[in-house]
């Protein structure tokens, strides 16, 4: 790697790491507020994104899949209902507002919501450097020992092999989640995480490679969607759904349960004792984890029943089961050993594809922050301590701000990794940074 370039001409008030929906919402909050201020009072913001363009779960943009949150929980509406960055303004610009309203639904197609994100991202593209993978975050210690800045080093998007180091008073980390692969399994040409479902399946179809059997591991929404998608994409293939439950669990989207995603619920959760926090997570896991929309459950059951009547069962559910081993077969496929848990009986499925719909996990903060991670305070469970304004609590000599967007379920509850409060969280972080900039 060539020597780094130091962009020392500018000290950024906010430097965002990652540019998914969370930092996109923050960039819009900054942009809208800056327009109301004189030039010398505006926040200088820049966001670094390793992808070459905006993208959000592209591998799961199934054509008929819908969002699981209301369109009103977009990037701005809960913060500023009059914003022209709203989903409704996007629809109006696309000429689809009346058509959407005639559907009488709160839940847009996932593909369409992604188009909305792209539309919003394009409008603030002057605040983003794409193709900029962050490789280091270093604290800048002054002569008096105070750490008032972080130096953020990223790869130069030109592809020159150099890196660029930028200085910031505050950084907003929103790297998203990383795919979880169960122990003992590794991703390969025929073993995918569901985050790569569409491009991988499309490649197989385009290459004309036959798929006689596909296996999906998992019991959540993504697993059920993968099962349905593969069943439709490969009409001659058998699709086996493997999960440890007896059947798919319906998602609890009832009005009272959904209050767990309200902004006020974050206040309640944040101030609660640790045992109450855990109880709330346990009580309301069925709103988000390992659950499936009832409509999709019923559709899959109906499909399986129709096939049973017709005498050709392509859709199989291997419930109360686990995958115990996956071996390469001599024909280039996979031999998947599946155990039926009540009896211990095992069967080996010869398969062409294994899809791991096994969820996501927070990215390791320490690997990104390096030395800066050592400045973060931790609680008794070795989790990073985070304030209500999403700012990490640090040792006293640090006056620079480190904000987390995601990875804070232990402090802020179930909404930490969801879209439900991105607009409100953006306002809270923006307000916190703005307050720190104002003279005392």
Image (cartoon, helix red, strand yellow):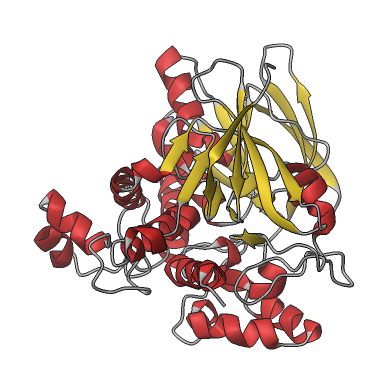
In the image, residue 421 lies at what x, y percent? 47, 70
Is 259 rendered above or below residue 103? below
- Report whether 210 appears left or right of 353: left
| Residue at point 26%, 60% (across, down) | 87
Work out which quarter of the rendered image holds the C terminus and state it: bottom right
Can the viewer see residue 340?
Answer: no
Across and down, in percent, residue 69 comes to: 41, 66
Q: In the rendered view, would you say 87 is above or below 354?
A: below
Q: Quadrant of residue 393?
A: bottom right
Determine whether 331 is above or below 54 in the image. Answer: above
Quadrant housing residue 25: bottom left
Residue drawn where x is 32% and y is 73% of the image: 80
The residue furthest front is 143
Residue 147 coordinates in the image, percent (x, y): 75, 56
Residue 105 image position (x, y, % from top left): 25, 68
Q: Nearer the viewer, residue 67 or 303?
A: 67
Q: Is residue 338 visible?
A: yes
């Amino acid at each position: 790697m060539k020597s780094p370039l130091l962009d020392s001409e500018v000290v950024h008030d906010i430097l965002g790491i990652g540019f998914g929906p969370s930092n996109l919402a923050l960039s819009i909050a900054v942009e809208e507020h800056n327009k109301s201020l004189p030039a010398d009072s505006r926040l200088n913001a820049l966001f670094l994104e390793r992808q070459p363009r905006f993208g959000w779960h592209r591998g799961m943009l199934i054509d008929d899949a819908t969002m699981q949150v209301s369109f009103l929980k977009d990037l701005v509406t809960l913060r500023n209902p009059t914003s022209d960055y709203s989903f409704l303004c996007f629809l109006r610009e696309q000429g689809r507002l009346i058509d959407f309203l005639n559907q009488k639904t709160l839940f847009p197609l996932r593909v369409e919501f992604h188009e909305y994100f792209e539309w919003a991202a394009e409008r603030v593209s002057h605040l983003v450097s794409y193709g900029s993978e962050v490789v280091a975050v270093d604290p800048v210690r002054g002569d008096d020992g105070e750490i008032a800045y972080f130096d953020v080093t990223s790869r130069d998007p030109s592809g020159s092999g150099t890196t660029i180091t930028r200085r910031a008073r505050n950084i907003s980390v929103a790297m998203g989640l990383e795919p979880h692969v169960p122990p003992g399994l590794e991703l390969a040409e025929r073993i995918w995480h569901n985050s790569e479902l569409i491009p991988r399946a499309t490649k197989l179809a385009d290459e004309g490679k036959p798929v006689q059997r596909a296996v999906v591991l998992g019991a959540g929404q993504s697993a059920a969607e993968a099962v349905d998608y593969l069943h439709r994409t490969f009409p001659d293939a058998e699709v086996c759904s493997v999960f440890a439950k007896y059947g798919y669990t319906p998602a609890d989207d009832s009005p009272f349960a959904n209050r767990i995603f309200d902004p006020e619920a974050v206040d309640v959760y944040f101030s609660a004792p640790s045992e109450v926090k855990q109880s709330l997570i346990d009580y309301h896991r069925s709103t988000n984890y390992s659950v499936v929309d009832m409509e999709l459950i019923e559709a899959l059951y109906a499909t399986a029943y129709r096939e049973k009547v017709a005498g050709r069962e392509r859709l199989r559910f291997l419930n109360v089961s686990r995958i115990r081993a996956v071996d390469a077969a001599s024909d280039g496929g996979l031999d998947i050993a599946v155990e039926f848990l009540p009896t211990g009986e095992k069967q080996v499925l010869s398969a062409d594809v294994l899809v791991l719909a096994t969820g996501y996990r927070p990215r390791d903060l320490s690997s990104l922050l390096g030395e800066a991670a050592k400045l973060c305070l931790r609680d008794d469970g070795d989790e990073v301590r985070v304030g209500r304004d999403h700012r990490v609590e640090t040792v006293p000599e640090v006056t620079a701000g480190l904000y987390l967007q995601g990875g804070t379920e232990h402090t802020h509850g179930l909404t930490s990794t969801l879209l439900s409060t991105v607009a409100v969280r953006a306002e809270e972080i923006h307000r916190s940074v703005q307050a720190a900039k104002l003279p005392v």
